[in-house]
Structures are given as structure tokens and as C-alpha cells.
Image (cartoon, coloured by chain):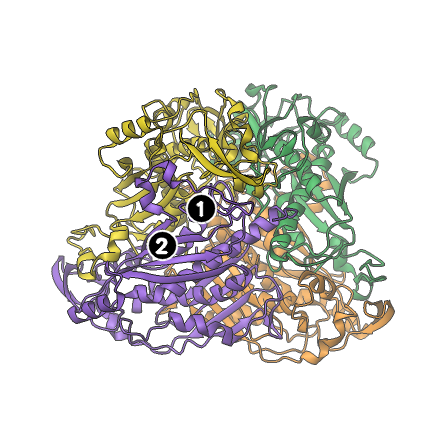
Chain colours: A orange, B green, C yellow, D purple
């Protein structure tokens, strides 16, 4: 199930310490101008480097393996990949019998009957989001003139993000955060009843991103505390603009043309500098585990561009489905 | 896109005031004992009737149209439907030009180019969840011995739910709520990387339910304020049991065998007794709108059984996918 | 896997002697004018009645359960069903231990672990094609101005069809036939590389129809005996018209605008009046089996309208996929 | 739509003269032992080299980009690719305005609005089947102990294949052929009613292969000329063995355990040495076209291994679907 989408289909592949990581984009319209350099802005935003992110460095230079000719997409599947280079696998040897708390070590061992490549969390690594971001670059071009922007709005429970990170680093601990994503100028009438609401599609792909544990649209969880008279967004003009936007631009699962807005909760990085107690499955007793190696203090710092990509891919797919079914509609 | 699932596929159909509503369940294993009466407990829980729910009454008697013979599922698609009876359509006549705030009136008008059946919100009605609940009854049998329970844990921001509803009714307003769902004794190793995590699958179907605006797993949004050392769930025995359950039973998108737990935010019913200002699209001016007719003060009251059904369906599908791929795994 | 299609999705349900048979059509565009009477022409063509067809009589009156309002499709799933009435199930009691040669008795017993409803072949009955034909009526409207026509071009190896049937009836035997289907004025550029060629899509659905054992497009099997210089179809004008049509209107899996033409081989009805030797699985010895009951001498007589429906559904789906991906193309 | 399969999903990418061609295999069970060398036998069978095949030579060395670790599949998607090397693109420059008869030049120009990479037929090239063959190597391991064998049984209408090819080469023409594929010892009970019969699944993928124009199962087209009493295959023992195998091992779309057998018709290579008349779309007049460059006299020579791969992939997918739904069945 490494692919997402009904018409615009994105398939990711690769492992943290394997040969390559990449993405195949199927159902990609022809005639989209794209060159390897066009991926660099978003791929760089995803990279580590700032304080609070891992010291692992990857060149991450994308190579287009198929689907682009003379500077345009051709209509054939677009494949983009990059080689993994900065691999230090010795860090990860002991986690089969002593799985790290919060990591996928334990479940991947069971899921794949001991055959999972567990180096750097293998296919469960956040590194797999590289392909998502690459596909997002193309998806963003498809959904134009919609403009997608995500940003980290809190970390460790605080809006003073820089300070929260410094504090966590000083404590050798990790922290989570909340990312807010807005889609300005979205197409109207996207989303398909019953099972492909805008919320369904976006949440499906956003929850594919490692470390995401919650999502809410518009007023979201606070809507549960509101009264209907306050939550309802009155229409105020003939374009369908609403006075408030508690619905996050989505009524009945369908985009109403107002800004789509959602927030995603990012849990703290599971790897921390602290020593943790956990179970040693081979010895059958509790043990202490210190996770060395390189890791992010706040993985949420790198999330905004990944979440933008996820939203763009979901939207591109919804756009193509709607276009396929409702050919004659004028917006 | 009125179907959900890769192997266990559920398709819903019907409109609030149309002939029938129902569901087709495909990929349903043979040999599941089921009779029309077995649906009644859950269908009754979904029905209105208690204070705070609509006065519309439907017999809701399920008829099994296909797929069951001699008291067992046969392996062929199971179709369950019921006739709509208590229809008063005159309540809904004016909403094409004056769409109700918070409702799907405006978007369904655009989406379906004016052809949507808008009586009682048509296919966008919460009534469509009847089919989801019916399918959930079968899905719950498939995922045994897992046990799924959902309950309303707050309404209108208060844990004193009864009082909150009385107050809202007195004010002629509506309120939202939060539903918590737990899956005890879930199968281990469900969830498929990258795009079919347990969270992806459950959130996809839960956000298909009208009025849901947020979902979180385990510690959820509060995880964003936690430190890794506190959020990580240490394993404490050889069965994979964890000391805490901040992950909600899911690591890396895969179930780890601990209780799966999630919460969904339900917005307040859009229909309220209050008069609301909104736009009259035919006259091109603001107007006042009072929504008469029958509606729920707190739609969240009827949500637990619907959310249980959604979770059961998602889990049944994940179970079959996993079983198809990983035939030889011993748990 | 009782559904077909990526965007235009058709799901069939029902058993030969069950409560109902029917079809759910999802991804159906709104605004298609349709009434129950519009189904009768094609449903009547599918019915038995002429010499050489079974004496089972069903009223087959379609009831529209959802998705149509005020005489038009609404954009919500269209469900069409009919009750089974003329059921004589006692004819089918012995086939569990002595499965009829050529029938699905043996495989359905294994497939569904003994739970299959085997009355009248249950879900494996040709009766399930009722839903396909009903969906085809709508699909034909969607693919207009393409016009789809199928006819029986031979039976029992002879083009004198009437005489071949009389002879088979006299012998108490059954015969097969070949159906040819043409799609005049098809949309250009349908078909998606690599895995959704026009041939792939049409053959997939045509081979779902019970009794089909072969399909060929254009020159088909005779192409294997041809030279390239003779098989190639030269273009002769600016519309893409070709001098010959050995390709059956499809190059590289994509429709080229010329008539799409294919032929399907229909095997003889498995039920015959003759006594047949076969194995008794309960006694573990060979036995003789005479199939009484009502059956078609030449099921191929009823196939043309079913094959038209299959082709229309495949084409409608390809049309919507293409439209979704290639929005800006002018044909 | 460059992917095939419900649970075992194969996605191909690449163009004839692009950077790379390859395949992503998703839903691949963990623990399958595989190394790059294991692909060489089948990839070599697919290669040109014998008389009657093109002089284009590709090293075709497979590189495993993901999904294999320590010599076994890991459960993550397996990606296999190879670089294109022997590219002479100048041969293909003129076909935009003078599309070659029988080729995809004309339709790909329309389909992709002029953006298709037409060098060597781009994504429509038979070269894309490289990925299919690579995936087939793994699929064959999954469906063991079933054994799949295909061979060319006639060329240019003759069973003396060598002589037919020599003759065609002498004439500077091309010829078609018929490939027969048998699957010995297949799993019983594969195939899903209604829309995923064994015939549907196999034909779907086989018709994705360029140049295939017909397929028939068991007696196939000759069944149309048979009587039921002769076509029916009597069971002769308790294992379900049948005396004859006119059904090709498939009843009601479900495998009955007997050998699955089908034949595919391969049209003659469109490129021939002969000069052909066709239309010049830029000048609006008929013209003469001689296709130089390297091409196969009889592409059917290279088909058997491709068709084996297609059958293996279809079967692997059917196996996993069946296993997912019918977990408890004992065969």
C-alpha cells in the first residue's frame, strides 16, 4: 500500500540506509514544465541543517528517471530518485531484541517476520518523505492557482519555538509541535461523497507521515465546545465567501472555496539522548537503552514542507477525480 | 467514491428522502453467521429518540438483499437496505438560493450542477451512516476477538453531558462533542507502510462521517506539548505490552497490540432553532434564515456507534490486506 | 471484487435465487436524464423468451433505489435493483456432492468453504448480468455520441444461427457462439498506458461475464498469421481515418478514433439435456448426471446486449480517467 | 494507470530512450530470497539476439534500488531498474507529422497533447516490458509450486517458426505469432466473482503488453463451435481432476486446480523494411514512409517470457486477495 491516489497516484519507495529513495508519479498530466532544479527549494526545506535537526547530511540531488522530456512532463509516469550516501548503519544493530520505545522497531519485526531492513528504521524512516516532497513539487503546479503554505506554530507546547528547542537540546530530550497548513484560493467543489471527503483524503495522506498523531480542520477540536449558532459560517457574498471560517473551507466534505485550513500534531522524536527503560525480548527482562546516533531534537521543524506536499497531492487527486466525473461544470 | 476499502470494500448508497438507503459489502468472508435481527442493536443505538436527538422516526428495519443464505454469509456481496418512510420534504425547499450556513447546500449545488437531491441534505445527510453501521456489525464479527467501544466523553465543552444538552435545548441552539473510541485486544501488525497506516485508514473513514472535524490517536494533540522521554511508551513484557499508551497502540503506523485509542471531534449540528444571517444567492443580498424542521440538538449523541462501525470496517480491511500479504506470519 | 472501474465504478450484487439482484453505479455524473422505462429496451433484450433460451421468466422490472431525482441523476450513487420472483430451487439440490461439469459448482464449493448459495448457481449465475445491463444503459448515455452495437455472428460454428439452434434443441444439446461488438464514433485517445489499455479494460469486464472464453480486437487471432505490411492500417486523412482497421481502432492500447471492433467467444451452456458422466465426491466414484431444470440451449443468444453494456462501462470509465488527467486537451 | 494489482501491485516506469526503465513491486511478501543474478535468466530470454529480433543491445543489468536486504525481500516495496544505454534517437525524428501505421505515434501525439517522448515509441515501447519481466521473476516465486511456461507455437501462421522468420526477413517484412502459456499445479479457488475472474485478471495484464490483440482460455474460440456435451470437462477423481480441459482450468472464473492454459495472439511488428503509404498530417497529403532503424522481424519471439511474467503477476495478486478474504479455508 505504498501508493496513494485514485487518478493522480504517488508511489514511494526506499529505505533509510538502502540504495535509493524515490517516488513514481502516475496519472501526471503532460505539459507541466519541470527540471531537477525545481525540486531543490522544497527538498532543501525538508533537509536537516538548522539547530534541532539531525546531523545526517544527504546531498539529496534528485535524478529524474522517467516521464520528463524536453523540460516537460510527457504523460508517462514521472520517477524521481536519489541515492543514499551518508549511511552509518552500525548505530542501529541492537534494536531487534531491544526495540526502541516509540519507534517502529518492534512492530516492523513482527510485521515483516524479521526480514525488515531496520537500519535507520528502514522503510519506516522519515527519510521516505523525500519522495513525498518531490511529488508535492509537481502537485503544487497542478493545483495552481491554489497556494499551499504550512508553518510550525508551536513546539513543545510553546509558541516561542526557538527557545523551546534550545531548552530541549540542553536537556538532551526531544519535543513535538503543531504545524498549521493553509490552502489559499482552493478549487471549489473538490471532495467526493461519501468516502472521499476533503478531510478524508488529506488526513489519509497526512497520517502516512511518520510522527503525526492528530489532525483537525477549521475550528477542529474546539468545535466540539462550540454552539451551532457560533460555529456556522454565514455566507456574505455571491462568491460564497463566509464571514468566519470555522469549517476550514469544507462543508459536507466538499471545498466551499474559502481557505482550507488544518493543523497536524507532531509527536516528539522517539530517539532522545536520555537513557530509557524498556524490555529486552531476547533476555526476557527489563533493560536500559541509550539511543546514540544522530537524530532530530524536534522533527516538527522539518514537517511544514512535507505537509504541504501531502496536501498538494491530495488536492491534485481530488481535482482530477472531480474533473473526470463532472466534466461540464462551470465554476 | 462511495466505497471504502482495498479488500473488504463497503459501498454506501441512498439519500435522506429518497427511496432507500443501504450498503453493499464486498470481500466479505463466507461463513459469518448473521441474521436481520443481529443488526438491530447497533442500528437502534444510531437511531434518534433520546433527548437532544431529532424527532424524525424511521423503522430502519434492515432487509438483506443478497449475500446471506441459511443464516451465513456466502462469500458473495452482502447487500443490506431499508426503505425511507418518515419523509417530510417540504421543510427543505428554500435552501437552493439561500443555502444554510454550515450545511452542504451550497457546495452540493455547485458540485452536482444543480442536480443534487437536496431534500434533507440528500446524499450528504447523516442518514447515510445507516449503511455504515450495518456494515460495521459484520466488520465487528470479522475483527474478533478485538472489541470496539466508543462513547461520548464531552458535549458542548462539558463532561456533564446531560446538563449541557438541556441547556442547549433551552437556548434553541446546538452543541458539539468529543467521542472516544477504544479497540481492545486488536490484532498486532496491522497497517501497511507507507500510505495505509492504521491512522490513515481509520481517519479516512471517520472523516467520511458528516460533522467530524478532528481526530487524534493516543496522546494526540497533547503529544505536541510533550517531551520524547515522557511520550515514549516503554515495553514491559514479552507480549509487547507498554507501560503507558501515548502512541494509542500504533507505532510507525502499525498496531503494536496494545489498545488502539482515538478521539474524534464532532461539530455542533448546523441546523439550530436560532435565526441566522446569510446570503441569498438569487437576490444577491444578505437575508435572515430560520431553519425549521426536525434536527438534533447534539448529533454527537448518535456518533459512538457510527464511529465504532467506521473503526471496525477500517480494521477488517487492514486485517485482510495483512493476511493476503503476510500469509506465513505467526503472531 | 464485485466492482469494476477507477472513476466510473459499477458494483453488482445478488444471487440467482436470492432476494434481489442489482447494481450500484458510483462516479456517475449528475444531470443524466433517466427513468425506469429507459432500462426496459436493453433489459428485455437480455431476457429469455426466444427459441433457444431458458423458460425461466422474470418480470425484471427495475426499481431505482437511489441517485435519481426529478428524472435526472443527482451525482450520488445510482442503485437499481429488481426482485427475483420465478425461483424453483429444488432443481439444484444435488450438485454439492456431484458438481455439474462445466459449472461453478465445484469451485464455488471450495472457494466459499461450503457456504456458497448454490441455488441456480447463486452469485455465479448469468442472472447477475442483469445489473451489468442496467448500468450499461447509463454508460451508453455517458459515452455518446459513440454508438455501441453487438450481434451474434455465429452459433455452433455456423452463421446460419437459427438452424444451428433448432438442430441443437433437437439433439438435446447446447451450443456456443461468437458475438461481435462495434463502437462507432468512439472518443479518441482513450486508454491509459501501461496497464489500462482499451483492450485491457474491455477484456477485463467482458471476461467477467459467465461463459466468455476468448476475446480478440480487430484482426485478432488472424493477425498472428499476417505480415506487417498487410496488417498495418495506413492513415488516409487528417482526421486519422485509416484505410483498413486491422487494429480494431486501437494503437498502442489507445483509441485512434476509428471504429473499435472486438469479438468474444461464448462457450456452450454447461447444462444440457444429455446424461453426463462425472465424479460423485461424497461416494468417491464416477456417476451419471442428468441436468433437469430450465436452461438455455444457446446462452450466446442473450449475450449481445450484455457485451454492449460491458463495453459501454469500460469506455465510460476510460473517458472519465482521461478527462481527469488531460483536462486541457482539445480533440 | 501504470500499476496493476489489488494487493500485489506492480508499477512500471520508463521510456525506450529515457534515462531508465524499471518497476516498483508493492505488497511483496517479506522473506523471498532474491539477488540481482536471479533476474538474469528471464531478462535474457526477453532480450533480443536470436535471428528475427532487433539489433538493439542493452546490457539490461538490473539494479535493486529498494526492498531487498541481506538477500531477502523485506516487506517494503521492491524497486528494480536499469539504465538505458544503446539509444539512437535520430531514427525517430519524423514521426510526429507522419505517424507510422500500426504504431502509437498518432495516438500518443493526441493523448499527451504533443508532449509525449516519441523517441523509440517512448513509454509505448515494448522495452517497458523489461519491468514486467523483472516483477515476474518475483511473482513466480510467490505462486510456487505453480509452474508457468509459455512458448511460441506458431509464427506467420505456420508452426515451422524458423522457416517463417527466414522467409519474412528475406522479404523485408514482419510477422505475428501465437504464444501458448500453461500454468501447471495452480492454486485452486483463485479468482473473485464478479469482476476479477482468472480470465479477467490475466487478460487485463496480458493486453497491457504491446502487440497483443487476442486471448483465449482453454478451448477458447473453438468452444464457440462446440456442443455442451463435448465441451464440458467431466470430473474424474476426488482431487477435481477433469478428463478433458476445455475450460482451461477455470470454471465460473475460478481456478479448478487443473492446468490453466491460454493463448495470446501477437500481431506482426509494425515497423517493417517495406515502404508504406500513409498520411502526412502537416502537409495534409498522402506520402510514403520507409521505417529505417532497428526492429524485430517477429516480436512474438520475445513474448513467451513476458507473458509468463504477466500470468505470474496476475496469479500472485489473485492468490493474495483470496488469502486475505478466505483465511480459514483448507485446500
Residue B154 image position (x, y, % from top left): 79, 39
Q: Chain ID for label 1?
A: D
Q: Nearer the viewer, residue B190 or A87?
A: B190
In-image side of D27 versus B282 (left or right): right
Residue D197 image position (x, y, % from top left): 47, 45
Please report the residue visible at 80 percent of the width from the left and 55 percent of the height from the top. Answer: B245
Residue C51 image position (x, y, % from top left): 31, 24
Mark closer to the chain start, 1 or 2: 1
Compared with residue A121, is residue C184 higher up or lower down, i.e. above or below?
above
In-image side of C165 versus C287 (left or right): left
How far apart marks 1 and 2 lie (CA) works out to 21 Å
In-image side of C316 versus C67 (left or right): left
Q: Nearer the viewer, residue D189 or C239?
A: D189
Compared with residue C277, is residue B19 higher up or lower down, i.e. above or below?
above
Instruction: State which quarter of the image contains the C terminus of chain A.
Output: top left
Q: Which residue is mark 1?
A: D243
**In front: label 1 or label 2:** 1
Residue A113 image position (x, y, % from top left): 68, 64
Q: Chain ID for label 2?
A: D
> For numbered disc 1, what is the local secondary structure?
loop
Q: Which residue is mark 2?
A: D263
Q: Nearer the viewer, residue A1 or B160?
A: A1
Q: Nearer the viewer, residue A167 or A104?
A: A104
> For numbered disc 2, what is the local secondary structure?
strand
Compared with residue A199, is residue B283 higher up or lower down, i.e. above or below?
above
Please report the residue visible at 50 percent of the width from the left and 71 percent of the height from the top. Answer: A81
Quarter-wise, where is residue A29 in the image?
bottom left
Amino acid at each position: 500500500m505504498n501508493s496513494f491516489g485514485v487518478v493522480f497516484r504517488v508511489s514511494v519507495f526506499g529505505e533509510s540506509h538502502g540504495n535509493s529513495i524515490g517516488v513514481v508519479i502516475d496519472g501526471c498530466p503532460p505539459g507541466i514544465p519541470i527540471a531537477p532544479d525545481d525540486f531543490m527549494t522544497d527538498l532543501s526545506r525538508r533537509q536537516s541543517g538548522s539547530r534541532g535537526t539531525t546531523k545526517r547530511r544527504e546531498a539529496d540531488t534528485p535524478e529524474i528517471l522517467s516521464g520528463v522530456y524536453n523540460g516537460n512532463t510527457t504523460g508517462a509516469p514521472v520517477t524521481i530518485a536519489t541515492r543514499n550516501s551518508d549511511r552509518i548503519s552500525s548505530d542501529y544493530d541492537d534494536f531487534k531484541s531491544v526495540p526502541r520505545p516509540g519507534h517502529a522497531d518492534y512492530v516492523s519485526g513482527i510485521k515483516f517476520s524479521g526480514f525488515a531492513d531496520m537500519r535507520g528504521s528502514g522503510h519506516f524512516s522519515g527519510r521516505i518523505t523525500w519522495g513525498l516532497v518531490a511529488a508535492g513539487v509537481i502537485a503544487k503546479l497542478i493545483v495552481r492557482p491554489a497556494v499551499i503554505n504550512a508553518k510550525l506554530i508551536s513546539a513543545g507546547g510553546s509558541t516561542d519555538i526557538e527557545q523551546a528547542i534550545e531548552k530541549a537540546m540542553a536537556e538532551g530530550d526531544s519535543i513535538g509541535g503543531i504545524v498549521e497548513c493553509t490552502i489559499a484560493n482552493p478549487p471549489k467543489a473538490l471532495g467526493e461523497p461519501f468516502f472521499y471527503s476533503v478531510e478524508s483524503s488529506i488526513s489519509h495522506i497526512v497520517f502516512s507521515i511518520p510522527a503525526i498523531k492528530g489532525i483537525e480542520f477549521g475550528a477542529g477540536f474546539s468545535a466540539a465546545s462550540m454552539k451551532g449558532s457560533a460555529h456556522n459560517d454565514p455566507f456574505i457574498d455571491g462568491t460564497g465567501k463566509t464571514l468566519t471560517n470555522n469549517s476550514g473551507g469544507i462543508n459536507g466534505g466538499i471545498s466551499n472555496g474559502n481557505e482550507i485550513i488544518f493543523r497536524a500534531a507532531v509527536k516528539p522524536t522517539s530517539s532522545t539522548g536520555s537513557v530509557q527503560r524498556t524490555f529486552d525480548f531476547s533476555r526476557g527482562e527489563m533493560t536500559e537503552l541509550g539511543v546514540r546516533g544522530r537524530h532530530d531534537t524536534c522533527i516538527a521543524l522539518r514537517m511544514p514542507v512535507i505537509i504541504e506536499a501531502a496536501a498538494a497531492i491530495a488536492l491534485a487527486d481530488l481535482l482530477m477525480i472531480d474533473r473526470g466525473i463532472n466534466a461540464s461544470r462551470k465554476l
